[in-house]
Each structure stands twice: as C-alpha cells, then as structure tokens.
C-alpha cells in the first residue's frame, strides 16, 4: 500500500451476525472515494443478501470460485491483484483458522493466499470462541505474518452473553484503515522511534531484561511510515517483523547501545518517539564466563544507565520529543514529573497490571503535555498508535507554529 489510504479495498464478509455492519462499512468506504469489491463466504448469505452489497458498492459481488461468468470477466487472480488492501469484516473464528492454516477452499481464502497486500481482520464471535486457545493461536500466527487485527470490542453480544468478541464499529474500522487527515501532515517528516526492551548481560547465558513486547513502538513506526514519514526504528531484542513501510531498522541489545544509536540518529530527526522500555541499571561487571553456583546468596552490583530521553532533550537543535511512562500507580503525578524531568514535549502514560500495558495486544493511554492532556481509550495497539500519532502531529505542528 502506498503511503496513506488504500484506493481499492477488497472486503471479505463472513457468516456472522455482524455482517450487517459490513453494509455500513461499504457505504463509509465509498464516501471516502475508496473503490470496494465485496467477496462473501457461503455462510455470509444467510445474514445479508448479495444484492445489498452490490447496490452499496456499485460492483458485482462474488461468492464462488466456480462462477464462470465472473471468472471470465475478472478472474480471482485479477481480483487479488486489483486490491490494494484486503479487509475481512466480520472475520469469524472459522475464517481465522482457515487463514492461519493457509487453506484455499473458497474464493475469499484463495484470494488471501494469492495476495501480498495488507490484510486487515475485524474479528466477530462469541466471547468464549474468541478466548479459546485455538483462536488465539491462529491470531498469533496471522499477526506474525503481518495481518492487522482490529478489535474486537467488549460488550453485549448477539447470543445474549457479554464479553470480548463484538466487531468494531464501521467508523472505527475505517479510522484504522484510512487514517485521519491529521496524519497527512507526517509526509516528509523524519521520525525516529525506539521500541522493545533492552537487555543487560550478566554472563554469556544470563541477562537482566523486562517484559516489553515492542508492539506499541512497532505500531507507531508502522503508522508513521504509512502516513508518509521517513521512519528509523531502533529496536531492542524483540521477535517482531519490520513493518513494511519502515525505511530503516537498527537492532540493539543494551541501554548503552540504544543510547549511542539514538543520540546519533536523532541529529537527523524532526520527531523522536521513545517507546522503548529501557533498563535503568546494568551489572557493574559482565562476566566473560558463565557464573557458577557458589552456595548461599549471590549479590549483584548494578550501575545506573544513561537516560536516553534526557540526553536527547539536551541536543541543539532539539527534535520534538515524545516519551512513554508505564506506571503501576499515581499515573498523572508520575507522568507530569517525567515530562518536566526529562525535558520531553509529550508523555504517553499507561497503567501496567490489570491486564493492560506490557505484553498485551491492546492498551489505553493518558497523554500529557505542557498545558494539556488527552485520554485515548483502550484499543488495539495499531489503532491506538494511529490516534496517538494524530495527537503528536497536532502538538508538533503547534510547536512549529510558535515563534522561537
Ligand atoms: N527512558 C530513557 N532512558 C532511560 C530510561 C527511560 O530514555 N534510561 C525513556 C523511556 O524510553 C520512556 C521514558 O524514558 O520514554 C520513561 O521511561 P520509564 O522507565 O517509565 O522512566 P524512568 O525514568 O526509568 O523512571 P522510573 O523507572 O523510575 O519510573
């Protein structure tokens, strides 16, 4: 996908009650001048008729690989090539399982296999089906292959139960897919993002680290790059693929390494987002040999690491600086203290624990800057990254507009 909006979307619709919301999604996509072609699974027709999608999209709707007339006009490979993005909404548990296993037993799954374009999935299912380890394993596989998962949301379900599994609303899906106009302001900006944990080695087999997955930083790097920014991503030890649009990735391990790379790269950056969960301390000594058990207690001496964000704030000219703060308590007081102490322009704070923050696929943020604040509600990290980025762009533009 080129920077910004996909112009041609292939919308896959599966057999779930949320299929009715897909009608609204087609309408909203068309309002943004995005061409839509709908492909239904066999079961989708139990919920919404093809004529509805045909009328809303203004295009023929396809449901079968074995439609001779359609194959003669726009064959399935042509259709896969035509799409700049594939969106499946609703995506049922069964569809996720078929995609995860690379099945191609109907038109929609065949198209997904025959395409290398961005794949967006908006799951919708009963909360127990969503929570089932099989579904979660399939999602992990699909995410690892680069699929973007939107939602699901929590709330009352069509089956009468309550829980996680409701499909996101069409406007939320659209917002994820087609970023708000604020993001257009990123075109040409040079953005430096740090992500993931840092590891401090004790000996050749052991290290001190933390549980950061790097997902938030990677989602921010992806969102900035898709909005047209030239992004350099500095990653600690993480198991994540480089987002497609990111121009450059530099892998580091320890805080001193991340410090050196960030300070050097920041000289050519307009905006720095420090999303890494940096180790504040490292062992005073790293043993070249494995430390052997000696019986009794083992004392480790730690020395303080440099503070990357604080040192970035001392650069002249100084890029626009966004830091993060993960807190277990006193969120606002700690975040405001960090904003001042580190000389940052913005701090995006989140509460860790209670199933939020580190190691999770979604998050919520409370963002502070000098003279303002904004709460970003709990959402998938990809969606949250877009929202945070829109806020960063707004604040960055406000700083640029201010007389020096
Ligand atoms: N940070 C940094 N260098 C460090 C430690 C943190 O650049 N040595 C950055 C992080 O990338 C993040 C912000 O500072 O953007 C806040 O990180 P956090 O760990 O919450 O803050 P600390 O200053 O380490 O404070 P504490 O751990 O005492 O809460």
Image (cartoon, rainbow, N blue to C red):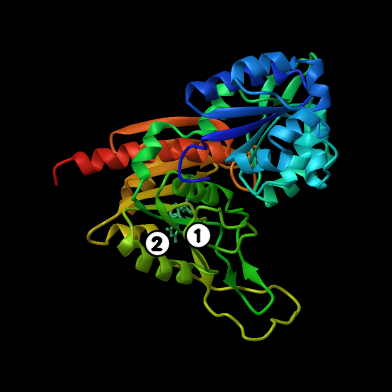
Q: Are marks 2 and 1 in contact (CB under 8 Å)?
A: yes
- The local crowd at label 2, few if under 14, some if 14 to 19, many if 20 or more residues have their Cα within 10 Å, is some
Residue 83 in sight: yes
| Label 2, label 1: how far apart the Cα atoms are | 9 Å
The structure residue drawn at horizontal position 82% and vertical position 42%, both measured from the top left corner, is: 104
- Give SS at disc 2: helix
Q: Is mark 1 within 8 Å of ligand 1?
A: yes
Nearest the viewer among 342 and 47 is: 47
- Give SS at disc 1: loop
The structure residue drawn at horizontal position 51% and vertical position 44%, both measured from the top left corner, is: 327
- The local crowd at label 1, few if under 14, some if 14 to 19, many if 20 or more residues have their Cα within 10 Å, is many
The structure residue drawn at horizontal position 61% and vertical position 57%, both measured from the top left corner, is: 241
Q: Position of residue 181 (x, y in %)?
A: 39, 32
- Quarter of the figure with residue 367: top left
Q: Position of residue 389 (x, y in %)?
A: 43, 40
In the displayed structure image, the side of residue 389 where residue 138 appears, left or right: right
Where is 215 relative to 368, above or below? below
Specify the label residue 234 is tagged with.
Answer: none
Residue 131 in sight: no
Q: Which residue is mark 2?
A: 308
Q: Position of residue 193 (x, y in %)?
A: 45, 55
Q: Which residue is mark 1?
A: 278
Quadrant position of ligand 1: bottom left
Q: Position of residue 164 (x, y in %)?
A: 71, 27
Nearest the viewer among 354 and 264 is: 264
Q: Is mark 2 within 8 Å of ligand 1?
A: yes
- Quarter of the figure with residue 21: top right
In the displayed structure image, the side of residue 76 where residue 369 appears, left or right: left
């Amino acid at each position: 996908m080129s920077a910004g909006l996909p112009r041609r979307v292939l919308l896959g619709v599966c057999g779930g009650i949320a299929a009715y919301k897909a009608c609204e999604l087609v309408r909203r996509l068309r309002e943004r001048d995005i061409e839509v072609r709908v492909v239904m699974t066999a079961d989708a027709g139990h919920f919404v008729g093809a004529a509805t999608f045909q009328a809303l999209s203004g295009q023929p709707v396809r449901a079968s690989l074995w439609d001779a007339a359609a194959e003669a006009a726009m064959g399935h490979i042509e259709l896969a090539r035509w799409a700049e993005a594939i969106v499946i909404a609703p995506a049922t548990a069964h569809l996720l399982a078929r995609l995860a296993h690379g099945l191609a037993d109907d038109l929609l799954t065949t198209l997904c296999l025959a395409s290398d374009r961005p794949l967006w999935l908006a799951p919708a299912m009963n909360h127990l089906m969503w929570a089932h380890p099989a579904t979660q394993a399939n999602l992990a596989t699909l995410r690892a292959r680069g699929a973007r998962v939107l939602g699901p949301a929590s709330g009352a379900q069509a089956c009468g139960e309550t829980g996680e599994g409701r499909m996101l609303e069409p406007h939320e899906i659209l917002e994820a897919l087609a970023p708000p106009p604020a993001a257009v302001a990123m075109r040409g900006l040079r953005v430096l993002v740090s992500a993931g944990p840092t590891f401090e080695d004790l000996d050749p087999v052991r290290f001190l680290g933390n549980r950061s997955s790097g997902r938030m930083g990677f989602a921010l790097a992806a969102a900035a790059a898709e909005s047209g920014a030239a992004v350099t991503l500095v990653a600690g030890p993480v198991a994540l693929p480089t987002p497609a649009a990111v121009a450059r990735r530099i892998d580091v391990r320890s805080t001193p390494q991340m410090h050196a790379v960030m300070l050097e790269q920041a000289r050519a950056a307009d905006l720095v987002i420090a999303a890494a969960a940096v180790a504040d301390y490292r062992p005073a000594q790293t043993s070249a040999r494995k430390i052997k058990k000696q019986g009794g207690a083992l004392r480790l001496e730690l020395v303080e690491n440099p503070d990357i964000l604080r040192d970035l704030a001392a650069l002249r000219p100084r890029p626009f600086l966004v830091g993060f703060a993960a807190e277990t308590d006193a969120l606002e007081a700690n975040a405001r203290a960090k904003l001042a102490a580190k000389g940052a322009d913005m701090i995006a704070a989140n509460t860790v624990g209670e199933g939020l923050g580190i190691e999770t696929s979604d998050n919520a943020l409370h963002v502070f800057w000098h003279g303002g604040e904004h709460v970003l509600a709990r959402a998938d990290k990809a969606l949250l990254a877009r929202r945070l980025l829109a806020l960063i762009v707004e604040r960055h533009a406000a700083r640029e507009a201010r007389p020096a």
